[in-house]
Image: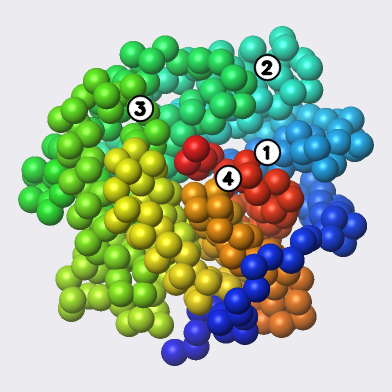
Amino acid sequence: MPKRYFVNKLLSATETNIPLDWNYWRAVLAEYSQLIEDRVPPVPKFADGGLYVGTPGIAYLFYRLMKSPFTASHKDDFISKGIKYITSSQSFVESQRARNATDFIGFILGPAGFQAIAAAFYTVAGDSTKADEHLNHFVNLHTYCSPLYPVSFGGNELFVGRAGYLAGVLWLQKELQKPILPVDKINEICHFIVQDGRKYASVHRSPMPLMYSYYDTEYIGAAHGISAILFVLLCCEDYLSKSPDAERDIKKCVDFILSLQTENGNFPCALDEVDHRRRRDEEDQLVHWCHGAPGVVYMMAKASLRWKDEKYLESCIKCGDVIWEKGLLKKGPGLCHGVAGNGYVFLLLYRLTADEKYLFRANTFAQFMTTPEFKRGARTPDCPYSLYEGLAGTVCYILDLFDPKTAAFPFMDVF
Ligand SMILES: [Zn+2]
């Protein structure tokens, strides 16, 4: 079986860090941004796929560019471009008919994500009327998190479910520096998530007190899986302090997932793979943000900060080691299953440990994406310019390399 990743020729390198050359990377950012604009113009037909692969994700990119101190001289240009992506995305979002609750509260793949980006974007752009309009839209969607709107295929995960909506609330709170939903509403949504998890776990005799499935698969990783749901719950500290029973159950789940970490540091994609008969061969294991260590690490990092137990930080470090070895993915440069998404784990580890080795690793991953070996050998993703699969995510990653003390995978800030 061919390898899923390029061999990391610097695997045993001991360098600490090499400073990045802004002039070089500024040219790379300009080239990538131009390509994105040319190939994904701001028209409603490209809005489908939300933040994940649609134009709302490109609007997020312009939001990042207009906020970055490194690209501040072009702020006005980024504002006018970003507004075009927001306007065209809005036409698409308003033309869609919702069939169930996830079509309302979907964050990475739905309208809630668009409303959140638009609210943050217009705030920074100085248009408070439009910012309030989108913020009100976003806030009003919280009613669809209630059990009155059950979702049979699984409505608690990150892309379309309650955890994603809450990730949006937490992100907006940080960006706008103000409460978005009253704390009791946030706690109520957490309670619905925990309640559903307990119900599912008991019906399916799960090995954890909380479990969830998405279209009948019990995913572990960040995409559709329990680790992203637990990550979001761990971010809701008021809920944890007021619900010790829930925190106990969450901790049992985190500890169980920790016990699944393989010798080399990775995690299985789904619970059925825990059974040794269905275990993947080592070379077939997925080391992606969506499935595997690069996504589960955010939950472990949050657990480490909350419960101050070394074993969670050790788990994060093991995640970093498997990513260093097997993370130069042939699937492309993106966040979800690409090199930039994996590189973000080194930025997380740098923030957790202050060890400069991780900056070296993060920079190495960025550099590798510009080599002929990668350009020739990597596959082109389905949506090569999008936020989660393509270059828009890569641009966010490069921007974050220049500000590693605040760097965070989009919508998964641990700090
Ligand atoms: Zn993926």
Would residue 116 be found to the left or right of residue 151 on screen?
A: right
Which mark sits nearer the N-terminus, 1 or 4?
A: 1
The circle on residue 143 is none
Asked whether the beta carbons under mark 1 and mark 4 sit within 8 Å of each other, the answer is: no
Q: In this view, does 18 lie above or below 26?
A: below
Residue 201: image x %, image y %? 14, 45
Q: Of tags 1 and 4, which is closer to the observer?
A: 4
Q: Is residue 97 above or below residue 5?
A: above
Q: Which residue is drawn at 50% across and 84% down?
A: 3
Which mark sits nearer the N-terminus, 4 or 2?
A: 2
Label 1 is placed on what type of residue?
Tyr
Which mark sits nearer the N-terminus, 1 or 2?
A: 1
Q: Which residue is drawn at 78% across and 23% down?
A: 125
Label 4 is placed on what type of residue?
Ala
Which mark sits nearer the N-terminus, 1 or 3?
A: 1
The circle on residue 131 is 2
Q: Residues within 10 Å of mark 4 (few under 14, many from 20)?
A: many
Q: Distance between the residues labelled 4 and 2?
A: 24 Å
Would residue 124 be found to the left or right of residue 325 on screen?
A: right
Q: Which residue is drawn at 38% across and 41% down?
A: 305
The circle on residue 408 is 4
Q: Name the residue under label 3.
A: 237
Element marked by disc 4: loop
Which mark sits nearer the N-terminus, 3 or 2?
A: 2
Q: Which of 150 and 331 is in front in this view?
A: 331
Q: Does the residue labelled 3 lie within 8 Å of ligand 1?
A: no
Q: How far apart are marks 1 and 2 (CA)?
A: 14 Å
Q: How crowded is mark 3: few (under 14 residues within 10 Å), some or many (20 or more)?
A: some
Would residue 310 be found to the left or right of residue 243 on screen?
A: right
Res 159 visible: yes
